[in-house]
């Protein structure tokens, strides 16, 4: 393969926002493991993850396409393939359509139509509703748009159960709720640091429209809410003590970051909060997984000498 070709591949790879999508796929995997006792079925797991990955990558490529003007103006995004001209819009559109079509074909043929439908709704929710409309319209853009990014555990759950179990909706939606409440502190921490980018690009992000001080309080509010919501898996008996320990320690650290952000030591501190948010979500979902799969016996009922119900 010559140099130009491998450079091209790298540009296409960048269109898929690989690191964001990796975490999205991991949350879908955790949804799959929590949906069933023991190991989830191999075919639905492998092709479910492949389909969700391709759909999220397609959504990310469409986001590049719709956001060309914004990406060119912002320092953080000025080196993206469309902003630099390394790829042209028709190439990006063709790539996104191919990934999206492949995703749907795999999910419909090898997983189930319900998962395909929910995944398609998430793709449209992020790529069109959030990127095309909300992002430009309201500072609540990422709160509402966060629903699409939060959906993957539900998609994973649907892939392996087809939502046949009695409590499927409640349990899967709780995982969605966790990511939904996590999204505002995740994004607004970065938006505080990048507020001049957003102001220049005329994107009404919260620190631009309502100021940095107000955004910091909003981050603290959602972080407190997140700490409460992350206790619910234990309260409803979905997760046990191993998860509880992890959630409490991770949550206390997040609270410390959000509190410290009210009076930060320097400008860069907001980026430390953002970086921690990514580590937090990755670790929280790892705790959910290990708790469910390796330590199912470590329940509050066991610890307090009560019999396990059900
Ligand atoms: C509407 C919802 C969301 C918004 C607006 C948002 C926004 C952002 C932004 C602007 C970045 C910086 C990207 C960059 O500098 O290139 C970022 C990074 C990141 N986001 Fe989000 N995000 C959202 C939801 C999610 C979700 C649902 C996940 C995963 C479950 C996620 C995982 C990540 C990760 C892992 C990074 C770090 C990427 C890297 O290191 O390159 N985000 N996010
Ligand atoms: C099918 C499915 C599961 C869809 C997943 C949706 C998805 C890829 C969510 C990612 C969230 C994200 C990176 C938002 C940033 O968008 P932005 O445009 O505000 O950030 P940017 O300025 O970095 O482009």
Image (tube, grey):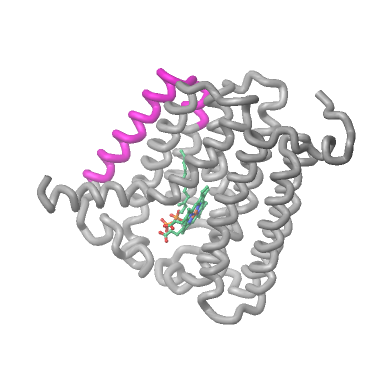
Residue at 43% across / 24% down in the picture? 107
Is residue 111 shown in magenta? yes
The front one of 93 and 34 is 34
Q: In this view, does 142 lie above or below 209?
A: above
In percent of width and height, residue 186 lies at 56, 59
Q: Which residue lies furthest to the left in this view?
A: 2
Residue at 61% across / 25% down in the picture? 38
Q: What stretch is highlighted in magenta?
A: 90-118
Is residue 31 shown in magenta? no
Residue at 51% across / 65% down in the picture? 190
In percent of width and height, residue 231 lies at 75, 47
Is residue 216 visible to us here? yes
In percent of width and height, residue 158 lies at 56, 26
What number of labels is visible? 0
Q: In this view, does 180 lie to the left or right of 10?
A: right
Instruction: Look at the magenta stretch and give its main secondary structure.
Output: helix
In percent of width and height, residue 245 lies at 73, 50
Q: Is residue 77 above or below residue 118?
A: below
Which of the 4 quarters of the picture holds residue 172? Answer: top right
Residue at 38% across / 42% down in the picture? 57
Instruction: Look at the image and tell me in which quarter the N terminus lies.
Output: top left
Q: In this view, does 132 lie above or below 117?
A: below
The front one of 122 and 300 is 300
Instruction: Look at the image and tell me in which quarter the C terminus lies.
Output: top right
């Amino acid at each position: 393969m010559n140099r130009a070709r491998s450079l091209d591949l790298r540009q296409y790879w960048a269109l898929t926002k690989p690191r964001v999508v990796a975490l999205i796929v991991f949350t879908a995997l955790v949804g799959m493991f929590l949906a069933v006792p023991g190991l989830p079925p191999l075919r639905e797991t492998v092709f479910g993850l492949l389909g969700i990955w391709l759909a999220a990558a397609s959504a990310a490529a469409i986001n590049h396409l719709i956001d060309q003007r914004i990406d060119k103006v912002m320092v953080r995004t000025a080196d993206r393939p469309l902003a630099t001209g390394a790829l042209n819009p028709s190439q990006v559109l063709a790539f996104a359509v191919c990934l999206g079509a492949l995703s749907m074909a795999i999910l419909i043929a090898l997983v189930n139509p319900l998962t395909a439908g929910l995944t398609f709704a998430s793709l449209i929710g992020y790529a069109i509703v959030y990127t095309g409309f909300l992002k430009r319209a309201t500072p609540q853009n990422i709160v509402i748009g966060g629903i699409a990014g939060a959906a993957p555990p539900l998609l994973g759950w649907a892939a392996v159960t087809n939502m046949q179990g009695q409590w499927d909706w409640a349990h899967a939606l709780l995982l969605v709720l966790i990511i939904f409440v996590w999204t505002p502190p995740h994004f607004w921490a970065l938006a505080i640091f990048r507020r001049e980018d957003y102001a220049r690009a005329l994107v009404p992000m919260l620190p631009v429209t309502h100021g940095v001080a107000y955004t910091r309080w909003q981050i603290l509010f959602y972080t407190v809410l997140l700490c409460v919501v992350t206790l619910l898996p234990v309260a409803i008996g979905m997760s046990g003590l191993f998860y509880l320990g992890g959630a409490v320690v991770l949550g206390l650290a997040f609270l410390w970051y959000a509190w410290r952000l009210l009076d930060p030591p320097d400008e860069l501190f907001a980026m430390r909060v953002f970086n921690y948010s990514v580590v937090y979500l990755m670790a929280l979902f790892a705790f959910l997984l290990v708790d469910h799969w390796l330590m199912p016996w470590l329940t509050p009922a066991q610890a307090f000498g009560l019999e396990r119900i059900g």
